[in-house]
Amino acid sequence: MEVLEYGYVSLNKKNEELCGDKVEMIPSEDGGATLVLADGLGSGVKANILSTLTSKILCTMAAANVPLEECIDTVAGSLPVCKQRGVAYSTFSLLTVGADGNGYLAEFDNPPAILLRGGKWVPLERAERTYGGKKLYISKVKLERADVVLLMSDGVVHAGVGETLNFGWDIKEIREFAEIQYDPALSARTMASIMANACYELYGHRPGDDTTVLAVKYRAPLTVNMMIGPPSNAESDSLVVSEFMAHDGKKVVCGGTSSQVVARELKTQVTTSFDYFDKDVPPIGYINGIDLTCEGVLTLKKLLVYAEKYVSVSDPDIKMFKGKDGASLLANLLLIEASAVNLFVGRGVNLAHEGLGIDNKTKLDSVVKLLNILRGLNKSVEIKYY
């Protein structure tokens, strides 16, 4: 069964502390989700209030299967009226998709969504309705494996106006750019960041409008199993390694002592690379049957730096890990590739850390931070302590 993955990046209009765009996401019990990208009238505080109310109300009601017309009526009756313009207005894109890939898309005055299948744009059949003098488009959606849907605010099509382009970024050009950038290995968040980064560059790093790209990907599941540290009782080594290896999916061993434990129980050896690709991250190792073997505390520390940047929705940099150091490889496995993560955390004390200011609490605190980040990315995470 495929899983639904989503991520977004928002750029504030220059000189504004608040973004006038808002994304709301509610996962469903069956593994699907309801997502809304709302764009409030104007910018700043007013726009932020309009988009926040719209996204929250619309997403909550749609997730509860309330008819779309009733959802819109509720939103229209809830928005405060702008004194300057005399209207209460927020555009939106609403996408609801089940675990089976079936759902619908409703678009109200936002740029049209882009569906990529196999790296090519697939046009959606859009049924037109008129609501409050504005056109509302409804599309049925049936996603296939590796499909990506891109939702965006109008800051995307305005990108470059008065800076690098005369008339902004045409939707046809946006689709062509998305096709070029598409790669089935990219996460939804990475794809969103690529599109948002292109807008940031077109704006000359000074966005003339709030700009948001929300990417939704229907992808194959992948479980990553990660062992961090040796068990507190050495007599449990065999049992823990056996349980670790019995789980399906990719295997990661994090920590020098745990690597020795795993290698011994698998009746093999650890070989260590001498290549320092990052001065702050110790070299990786190799164990037959293990996908990644890396050092523990220092690698985890650098991983958390990468992870915090990856989850930031306001960072315009492309969210991708191309490094060959252990932290980059680990970030790619956990943040990009994995849809589910099983953490096997040993509470054993590493004698090699004595005198270095590194204790068990440091490791366990890092694990908790990692756990929260992974769950914040809507990944299924299980943890066991030994």
Image (spheres, rainbow, N blue to C red):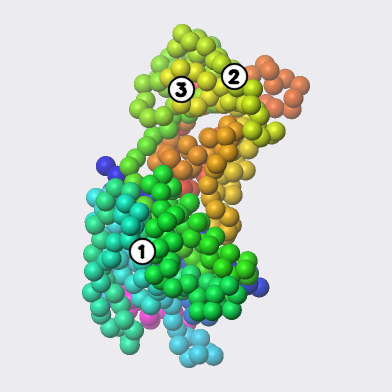
Within-10-Å neighbours for mark 2: few <14, some 14–19, many 20+: few
Is 269 situated above or below 312?
A: above
Q: Which residue is mark 2?
A: 272
The crowding category of the residue bearing disc 1, from other C-alpha atoms within 10 Å (few below 14, some 14 to 19, many at least 20), is many
Image spot of residue 11 (x, y percent) = 56, 65
Residue type at tag 2: Thr
Task: Say if 180 sits above or below 299 in the image.
Answer: below
- Viewed as shown, does residue 213 lie left or right of 16? left
Dot 3 or dot 2: first in sequence order is 2
Q: Is residue 78 magenta?
A: yes
- Is 376 rendered above or below residue 40? above
| Residue name at image x 43 percent, y 66 percent | 174
The kind of secondary structure element at disc 3 is loop
Gap in angstroms between the C-alphas marked 1 and 2: 45 Å
Q: Is residue 214 left or right of residue 220?
A: right
* Residue identified by numbered label 3: 290
**Kind of element beneath mark 2:** strand
* Residue at image location 72% in from the left, 20% down from the top: 354
Instruction: Give, as a single range, the part of the protein colored magenta.
Output: 71-80
Look at discs 3 and 2 and give the one toward the viewer.
2
Residue 44 can be seen in this image: no
- Residue 114 marker: 1
Residue found farthest to the right = 355
Residue 2 quadrant = top left
Residue 102: in magenta span? no
Q: Secondary structure at mark 1?
A: strand
Residue 340, percent from left and from top: 40, 38
Main SS class of the magenta portion in the image: helix
Task: Name which residue type carries label 3.
Answer: Ile
